[in-house]
Amino acid sequence: MTRTFAAIALAIAATGPLQAQDSSARRFVLIGCVSQENAKSPLMITDQRRDPPLVYRLDGDPKQLSMLVGQTVEVTGPITSAPKQPPTLKVTSLTRIATSCAKGK
């Protein structure tokens, strides 16, 4: 038991504090409504927990994500940004919260 605890403590110490990690490796959590203007436009998520709502592009499996259009989901992953475009979240995990989207505030 003591060896296991020591090994875990050593592993945590070796990774260093969370603040020292590169921000590009950070995972973010968004909760919002998945949308898509048309079949050729990017999939988006709108997080309405803020005023104004935050909008992100979703980077993931288009077949799986398109089945969630009009539904509320929780997605996690790193966020990247590009000039003149909404930030993009690379989907690493996804959980369906509701089969519909909440109406605006």
Image (tube, rainbow, N blue to C red):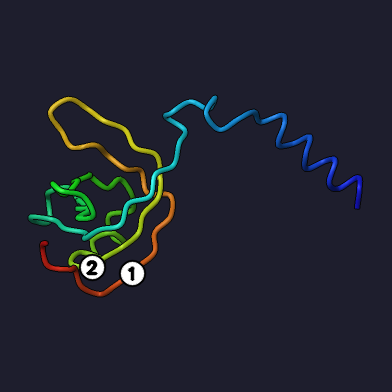
Q: According to the image, label 1 marks what residue?
A: 97
Residue beneath the point at 47% across and 33% down: 25
Report the amino acid beneath label 2. Answer: Gln
Compared to residue 99, the image places residue 51 above or below, namely above
Q: Secondary structure at mark 1?
A: strand
Question: Which one is nearer the viewer's eye here, 62 or 93?
Answer: 93
* Crowd tier of the residue under label 2, counting other residues whose Cα lies within 10 Å: few below 14, some 14–19, many 20 or above: some
Residue beneath the point at 70% across and 36% down: 12
Mark 1 or 2, nearer chain start: 2
Query: Which of the numbered marks, if any, corresponds to residue 35?
Result: none
Residue furthest out toward the left: 37
* Badge count: 2
Q: Secondary structure at mark 2?
A: loop
Compared to residue 18, the image places residue 73 above or below, namely below
The answer to whether the residues at label 1 and label 2 have Cβ atoms under 8 Å apart is yes
Residue furthest out toward the right: 2
User: Viewed as shown, does residue 105 lie left or right of 11?
Assistant: left
Where is residue 9 drawn, in percent x and y? 77, 39
User: Viewed as shown, does residue 83 lie left or right of 25?
Assistant: left
Q: For the residues marked 1 and 2, what is the alpha-carbon distance in whole angstroms?
A: 8 Å
Residue beneath the point at 42% across and 29% down: 24
User: Viewed as shown, does residue 61 lie left or right of 7?
Assistant: left
- Placement of the C terminus among the 4 image quadrants: bottom left
Question: Which one is nearer the viewer's eye here, 104 or 72?
Answer: 104
Q: According to the image, label 2 marks what residue?
A: 71
Compared to residue 102, the image places residue 63 above or below, namely above
Where is residue 99 drawn, in percent x and y? 25, 75
Report the amino acid beneath label 1. Answer: Ile
